[in-house]
Image: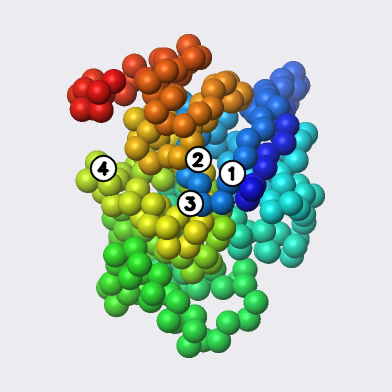
Amino acid sequence: MVLEVKNVSKVFTVGLFSRHKIEAVKDVSMRVEKGEIVSLVGESGSGKTTLCRIILRLLEPTSGSIIYDGIDVTKLRGKKLKWYWRKVHGVFQDPYAAFHPFYRVENILYQAFNLMPKVEEGEKKRRVHEALKSVGLNPDEVLGKFPHELSGGMRQRIAIARCFILNPELIVADEPVSMLDASTRIGIIKLFSDMRDRLDSSVIFVTHDLGLAYVVSDRVLIMYKGVIVEEGNPVEVMEYPSHPYTKRLREDVPLLYRKWEGF
């Protein structure tokens, strides 16, 4: 097992005077096995992104723990987190927001080496070029460009190239294709599959699209109002949904798609 989430909850307190509490994630437990693509499916506001940010140690859980490779990483701080971020890396919905707008692509990718032990300059250059080629980009064409000079698909490929440099054991992909057009999505999804096969990495793939989860996943988790309400392999969840929310998500899968797949 690569990752285990144990009874994680996250409560946000909002308001200056009323101090209203919102429980975004409620006692969630899940696991990710080595080489597995696990899809976390739910609509906006279901708690998917909050859970991902907790797994990435970008948010502190209110309770519960994150176990990575048998080690409780919930309380890691400072430099100790560099080791974890090298092993568990994120790809976000909007790569433009994840990049420094005044850094060229070369600088953005070289930042990955800040999480590693010392690497020689020649080796850095080789790995950056290799990573860009792995995601279908020409290093000579993109290294000198700023994020705003690239298309959304190219920016997302660069975010994935940064993962190739780090060679993480787990990639947390939070809605990585939701802002891309249909033709670009296919290439990005294939990259995650290739990364799983080439690097032997595991992937948590977050989406609101049950049809997409059916295509890419080894296992599907349905999240509703901060709770995982259903879990199973893609065929079980799509063909025999047990929770009313899963049934509703299934109905949102385009009719033509369901006809092709026989559902």
Mark 3 to mark 1 CA distance (whole Å)? 17 Å
Instruction: Kindly indicate whether the residue at mark 2 contacts the one at mark 1 (C-beta within 8 angstroms).
Output: yes
Mark sitting earlier along the chain (2/3): 2
Mark sitting earlier along the chain (1/2): 1
Instruction: Give the image quarter of residue 209.
Output: top left
Name above or below for residue 227 compared with residue 149.
above
Closer-to-camera residue (169/90): 169
Label 1: state its secondary structure. Answer: strand
Mark 4 vs mark 2: in front: 2
Mark 2 to mark 3 CA distance (whole Å)? 15 Å
Q: Residue at x 68, y 39 (%)?
A: 5
Q: Which residue is mark 1?
A: 32
Q: Residues within 10 Å of mark 2 (few under 14, many from 20)?
A: many
Instruction: Give the image quarter of residue 132.
Output: bottom left
Q: Which residue is mark 4?
A: 181
Q: Amino acid at mark 3?
A: Val
Mark 4 to mark 1 CA distance (whole Å)? 29 Å
Q: Residues within 10 Å of mark 4 (few under 14, many from 20)?
A: few
Q: Which residue is mark 2?
A: 38
Image position, residue 124 (x, y; %): 49, 80
Name above or below for residue 148 compared with residue 186.
below
Q: Residue lying farthest top? A: 244
Label 2: state its secondary structure. Answer: strand
Taking the image as drawn, is residue 223 in sight?
no
Closer-to-camera residue (248/82): 248
Q: Amino acid at mark 1?
A: Val
Mark 2 vs mark 3: in front: 2
Mark 4 to mark 3 CA distance (whole Å)? 17 Å
Mark sitting earlier along the chain (4/3): 3
